[in-house]
Amino acid sequence: MTSDTTIASHDEPVLVLEPGRADKHYWMDLWRFRELFIILAWRDLSVRYKQTVIGVLWAIIRPFLTMVVFTVVFGGLAGLPSEGDAPYALMVFAGLLPWTLFANSLSEASNSLVDNANLISKVYFPRLVVPSAAMVTALVDFLISLAILAGLMVFYRYAPGPQILLLPAFTLLALLAALGPSLWLTALNVKYRDFRYTIPFIVQFGLYVSPVGFSSQTIPERWRALYGLNPMVGVIEGFRWCILGGEAPLFGTSFIVSLVVVAFFLWFGISQFRKMEKSFADLI
Amino acid sequence: MSDVVIKAEGLGKKYTIGHQAENGSYLALRDVLMENARGLWNKTRDLARGRPLIVGDTHEEMWALRDVSFEIRRGETVGIIGRNGAGKSTLLKVLSRITEPSAGRVTIKGRVASLLEVGTGFHPELTGRENIYLNGAVLGMTRAEIKRKFDEIVAFAEVERFLDTPVKRYSSGMYVRLAFAVAAHLEPEILVVDEVLAVGDAKFQKKSLGKMGEIADGGRTVLFVSHNMGAITSLVRNCLLLHNGELVTIGPPEQVVRQYLDRNSSLAQSIAQRTDRFGTGEIRFIDCVITDTLNGSPREDFFSQDDVYLTMTLLVKQEMKFWVSVQLVEVDSGRAIMLADTALHGLELRAREGEEVTLTLHFPAIRLLEGMYSVTLNVFEGSSIERCDRVSDAVRFTILPTDLYGVGRTVGSAQGVVHLEHEWLDVANQTLSRSK
C-alpha cells in the first residue's frame, strides 16, 4: 500500500506524528497560538464579569476585608511587630497582594484543563495555552487591588522608594511561582479528578504558613532558610521591600532558597505537564 | 503536480480500558489506591497459595486503529466511512494532532485545521459577535483573518439582527448556523471534518453541503467523515472504508460505499409489534424487508439503477381472498410517488386459516433519484375496499446520488424524483459525440 513516495519539504511545514516523538516546534507553536492565549484570557475575563452584580468590586472587597481582619488579629490582638515604621495595615496589604495573586492563579489554572475539556478533546493547540491564559484573570484582579494599595499609601502618607520600580519583576515571580505547581496539578487533575479538592486546602493552609498576616522578621533567623522552602516567602519579602523599603531581601537566605524552589517547581511542572499533555485528549 | 500531502504508515491507536473504572467516566485517585491495594492483596494471596501471578488482568487493550496505511494527494477530497466504532473519529483525531498515535507514523505537509464538532469553544454567555472571534481563534484563524471574513460569516449564518445577543438566547437552529458559518470560512491547506454536515434544517444542510463542495473545488485537501452516503458520493473523489479499526478499502466512492452497504446489512425491525395501524385485523402484516436480491439480506441504501425487492409477510386469521397495495412516499416532501397493487395486475390472492403468506414486489432498476423513501402497506379483503390492515412508514430506504451513465457525474435530487430511461438520438449523425 505504501509506495516509496517521500514528502519533500519546500516552503510548507512538514509534520511527523509518531508515538513518543518529542515535538521540536513546541515552543514555536506556542508562540503561533498567542492569539488563542489572548482570546481565551479575554473570554475568561468577560464571562467572569458578565453575570455579577458588582463585578470588578469583588477584586477590591475581598482583599480589603482580609486585610482589616489580619490587621486587627495579628497587629492588634496578637501585637506582632510591623516591618520598620510601616503601618501594620500597609504591611499586611503588601503581603496580601502577591499572596492573592498566587492563590487565585493557582486555583484558576489548576482547574483550567478540566473546565476546557471540550476544547482539549476537539482541537489541537499547545495545551500550555489553557492554564497560562487562565492566570490572566488573577493578574487583572491583582492590578485592580493595586489601586487599593495606592489608596492606602495615600491615606498613611507613605511614599515608596525607587525600589517600587522592581514591583513588576516580583509580580512575574509570583506568577511563575504559581505556574509551576498549577501545571502539575492541572495535568494530574485530568487523570485524577480529586486533585481539584487539594487546591482550596493548599490555598487556605498556605495563607497561614506564608508571611501574609505577619512580618517574616518574626521568624527566628536560624529558621529562615527552612522557611524559604515556601516559595511565597521570597515573593512576599520582595513585595514588601518594593513597597515599604527597608533592608533589601535579595541576598537573604530565605529569598535565595525561595528562588531555587520556584525554579525547581517551574521546571518540574513544565516537564510533568509535557509528559502528560499527549494523553489529555484520551483521558479528559 | 498532485503530490502526497498526508502519508500514513502502519498507523495504530491503542486505548486501555480499565474494567474497574467502568462506573465513572473518570478515575479518582481513591479508586486507584483502592485498586492497587486490592491488587497487592490478591497477589499476596495468590503467592501464598502458590498460584502464578497474572499481570494486567484488569486492563484490556483496545486498538481503535490498527495498521492503517494510505496516501492522500494535494487537492483531493477524501471520504471516510464505516460503522460506529470503526475508528473514523480516532483517525481524524490522530491526523489533527489531538491525540498521539500508538504505532506507526503520519507525515503531513501543510497546515491542518480540524472541525470535529461545530461550535467548539462557544460560550453561552458571550454574544454572537464575540463567539465568532472566540470560535475562529479556537479553530486556528488569526484575528485579522476573522475580521476580514466577519461580514461573510454573519451573512452566511443569517444572524445579522442577533449579533449582540448572547448565544444562550439563540434558537438551536441559529446557534448551529452561526457555528457552521465560522467553520466554513476556515482556509487551511488541509481540512479535517467530522460529521458536521448533519446539522441544521434541510435547507441549511443543503447550503452547508454546497459550501463543502466549494471548499473541495477550491483546491484544498479535505478529509471528511460522514454517515450521509449521499454526501460522500457527491462530494468525494476517493473514499476510505474502515472496519474495526482496520482499513478495508480505499477507492472510488461508489465502489467503496457499495462495499460498505453490503457489509452493513442491518436487520429491519419487525413490524409485527406496531400498534399504530388501522383495519379489521383479519389479515395483517407481520414483516417487511427491502433487499437488493430475492431472499437477500435487508438493506437501506441503494443507487438509482439498483434492483429493489420489497418482501412482506402477512398472517391470515381465517381463510379469505385479499389484495395488497404498496405506496411509495418521498419523505422530504411527503409526496406519493406511486402505488403498486395486486388488483391492478388482475391478481387474486387467497390464503388458508393461520397461514403466513410471503409476497415480494420487485422494482427492476428502480430509477428513483436521491432521497429517502417510505413504504406504506395496505391489505384489503376480497374484492372490497374493506381495509384489513394498514401500516404506514413500514420501512424506509434511501437512494444515493448515482453516476447513472458512468461518466463521473452523479444524478441526484436536483434532477428531480425519477429518472426515466431515455436516450439521445442524432439521426443525422452530425452533432453527437462522446466527450473523452
Image (spheres, coloured by chain):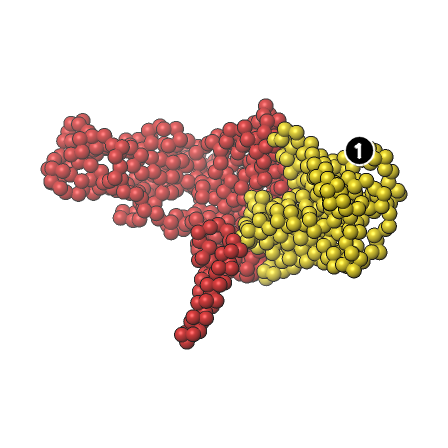
Q: Residue A50: give x, y in percent of width and height.
A: 63, 31
Q: Residue A266: give x, y in percent of width and height.
A: 71, 55
- In the image, taking residue B389 as reference, residue A228 lies left or right, namely right
- In the image, taking residue A198 as reference, residue A76 lies left or right, namely right
Chain B, colour shown? red
Q: Nearest the camera: B2 or A123?
A: A123
**Mark 1: amino acid:** Gly
Establish if A15 lies above or below B135.
Answer: below
Chain A, colour shown? yellow
Q: Residue B221: give x, y in percent of width and height.
A: 58, 46
Which of the 4 image quarters holds residue B356? top left
Task: Check the image and name the residue furthest to the top.
Answer: B161
Residue at the image position 85 percent from the left and 46 percent from the top: A84
Q: Residue B12: give x, y in percent of width and height.
A: 52, 59
For numbered disc 1, what is the local secondary structure? Answer: helix
Establish if B393 lies above or below A281.
Answer: above
- In the image, taking residue B430 as reference, residue B283 lies left or right, namely left
Q: Nearest the camera: A97 or A127?
A: A97
Residue that label 1 marks: A151
Establish if A177 lies above or below A146.
Answer: below
Residue at the image position 38 percent from the left and 36 percent from the top: B372
Residue at the image position 56 percent from the left and 38 percent from the top: B119
